[in-house]
Image (tube, rainbow, N blue to C red):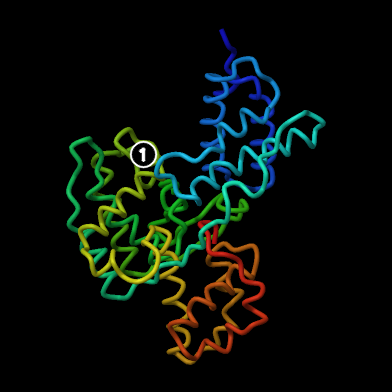
Amino acid sequence: MRTVMNGFACSLASHIQNLLALKHAMGLPYEESERHLRHFDAMCARDYPGQDTLTREMAMAWAVGRDGEHVNGQMRRITPVRQLAKHMSGLGVAAYVIPSGIPGRQVRYRPHIFSHEQLRAIFDAADSIRASGYGGQRQLIIPVMFRMIYCLGLRPGEARRLYRNDVDLARGTVSIRESKGHKDRIVFMSPDLHDYCCSYDAAISAYHPDRMPFFPNRSGSFYHASSIDYWFHELLTTAGPAVVSSPGSPPRPYDLRHAHVIESINRWVRAGRDPEAQVAYLSRHLGHSNPADTWYYFHLAADFHPDLRRLANTDIESTLPEASHGI
């Protein structure tokens, strides 16, 4: 009978726990990676009971591609196990590190930039969403959550993890706590969004009067990221082919954050304001630690506004990071 250590069951449990503690101490939420490590732990406990060394056989059994798995997903699944092996090796514990060439090159994601018409179709679909037969009040939650992501430029995970006390309906502010890099920030709602959130709060309180999450699931807890992805896919399907089949990569919830930033930059240009002077403000608003992450959006905006092309010059482009869920 095996011993379970804080939810981990294999003989590498202590090393996994130490890696997670280190990542959290560095200010990394590490949420998705922790999920992959838990699945890796379950595989090791099932197939390699008592094995306290991370062997090549264990690592490569985990690394093998799965039916229908995208190379980017495979890479995200492999990376935390590779980091675990490096962490163990750094402590002098024998561990096989999955070679860097596996699974191959990541497919570059090109953010989908929505037109105003596409955004209107998405939010019309959100407003027409129906209640689920499984409980919960998604017909109240979905229209507000996706509007907050777009109108405030939130990361989807930030919106999903909001506590009720984070949304100050008296002042019209939203506090984003312990986000990427453990950076806290406050963003301000527009009058329209403020009114929308007040109406939502009154409606959802009838079902969850003592809730802690701003967006509670049927049990009063937080929704999982997979629910947000599923809902967004449902909205895209309802919105129709004009949104789904547009040029570029398939849309994701994160693209609503991209759309918010691009619209803000273009609005500054139309108003005659110098976008370069807004970089510090924009970085703080988005919760960026690295200015290069903010310059990335000027690179995107240059594709849609000729006046910005002077900013997307060769020197800036050489420092731009790849688009990712972390921007």
* Residue wearing tag 1: 211
Place of residue 126 in the rendered image (x, y in percent of width and height, measured from the top left): 24, 58
The image quadrant where one finds the C terminus is bottom right
**Residue 156 occupies quadrant:** bottom left
Q: Position of residue 12 (x, y in %)?
A: 66, 24
Q: Say above or below: 276 vs 121.
A: below
Q: Tell me if 162 is positioned left or right of 313 in this view.
A: left
Residue shown at 40% from the left, 62% from the top:
172
Rendered residue at 59%/76% (across/down): 279
Is 75 situated above or below 6?
Answer: below
Left or right: residue 51 compared with residue 41? right
Observer-nearest residue: 314 or 21?
314
Task: Check disc 1 and give the amino acid type.
Answer: Arg
Which residue is found at the position 28% from the left and 64% from the top? 244
Q: For the N terminus, give its image quadrant.
A: top right
**Residue 114 against residue 85 in the figure, above or below:** below
Q: Write down the quadrant of residue 292 in the picture.
A: bottom right
Among all residues in the image, which is located at the extreme top? 1
